[in-house]
Image (spheres, rainbow, N blue to C red):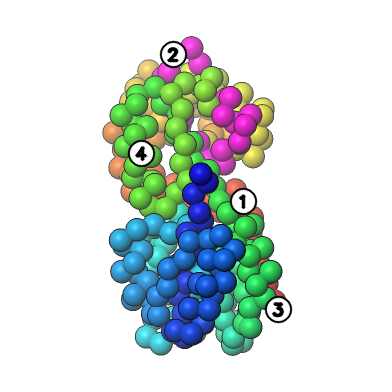
Amino acid sequence: MEEKTSILIVDDEAGLCKTLAKILDKKGYETATAESGFEALDMIKERAFDIALIDIKMPVMNGVETSKKIKEIRPGTITILITAFTVDDLIQEGIDEGAYAVLHKPLDIDVLVGSIENAKENEPLLTIVDDDPGICRIMKDILNRKGFNVTTCKTGAEAINATRERPGDILFIDMKMPALNGLETYMEIKRINPNAKAVLMTAYRQEMEDLVENALEEGVYTCLYKPFDMDEVIKLIGEVSKKVRNKPVENAK
C-alpha cells in the first residue's frame, strides 16, 4: 500500500485548521494541525512531515520564521506558505528561504492540491551508492529522519538501473567500488539523466586524487572524504537542492 503524503497544517485560526484537515483527509492525505509556530516545531521534532502548510500572519512567531525553523530541524520538509494579507516583504523572504509556493486566502482547494502534488513530484530524490551496507544504512536513517526521500544502491550497475526507472536528483557515490568505480557510475548516470547532481565519497584521498580531479572536471559537485560529518552532508544537500528544484512561485488567487 502506498504511504500517504503527510501534511502539517499550521494556522492560528483553529476553525481553518480543522476545515483544511477534513478536506485534505478526504483527498487521501494524512494531516495533523498546529495553532502556533511553537506547537508546529514541537510536532516536527517528534516526527517528519512531507509538507508543512503554514499561515504567514501568526502572533509571536510568523509563518516565515516557523518555516525557517522547521527546515533547520527537518531540512527535507517542503513548506507552502498561505496568507490573507499583502505582506510582500515576508512573501519574498519566505521564497528566498526555500518555501515551495505562496497561496492566497481564501484558498482554492484545487490550486492547493495541485501545489501539494507538484511539490511532491519535484521533491529531490537522494540516492546513496556505496558497496558498504553500513554507510548506506547510516546515511539513509539520518537523512530519512531529516525528512528527505532517500534510496540506496550497493553497486554502480544497480544505481544505473535505478536511474533508468526513476532518475535521482542528488547522488552520493562512493569512488572505490567493484566493477564500476564512482566516476564510471556517474558518467553513465549523467548520460541517462543530464540534470543529476553528484557528490563523490572516498576514504582514499591520495589514491583517488587523479580520479576525483577528473570527476570534478566532468561536472561532479564536490567530493567528501570519509569519515565525514553528516551535518556537512545536509548542508551540501541544501546547496545542491537549489540547483535541482524548480524555482518557487507565488500563486495568486
Q: What stretch is highlighted in magenta?
A: 160-180
Measured as percent of width and height from the top left, residue 34 is found at 40, 75
Quadrant in which residue 187 is drawn: top right
Considering every residue shown, the one lying at the far top of the view is 179
Residue type (three-letter) at the residue carrying disc 4: Met
Q: Is residue 221 visible?
A: no
Residue 15 seen in the figure: yes
Between discs 4 and 3, the one toward the N terminus: 4
Q: Residues within 10 Å of mark 3 (few under 14, many from 20)?
A: few
Q: Which of marks 4 and 1 is nearer the N terminus?
A: 1
Residue pictured at 38% horizontal, 27% vertical: 202
Q: Name the residue under label 4.
A: 139
Q: Are marks 4 and 1 in contact (CB under 8 Å)?
A: no
Which label was assigned to residue 178? 2
| Observer-nearest of 14 and 217 | 14
First along the sequence among labels 2 and 1: 1
Q: Name the residue under label 3.
A: 253
State how far apart marks 4 and 3 are (Cα).
Answer: 41 Å
State how far apart marks 2 and 4 are (Cα): 20 Å
> Which label number is shown at residue 121?
1
**Amino acid at pointer 2:** Pro
Q: What's the residue type where badge 3 is placed? A: Lys
Query: Disc 2 or disc 3, which is closer to the eye?
Result: 3
Q: Which of marks 4 and 3 is in front?
A: 3
N-term mark: 2 or 4: 4
Is residue 15 shown left or right of residue 70?
A: right
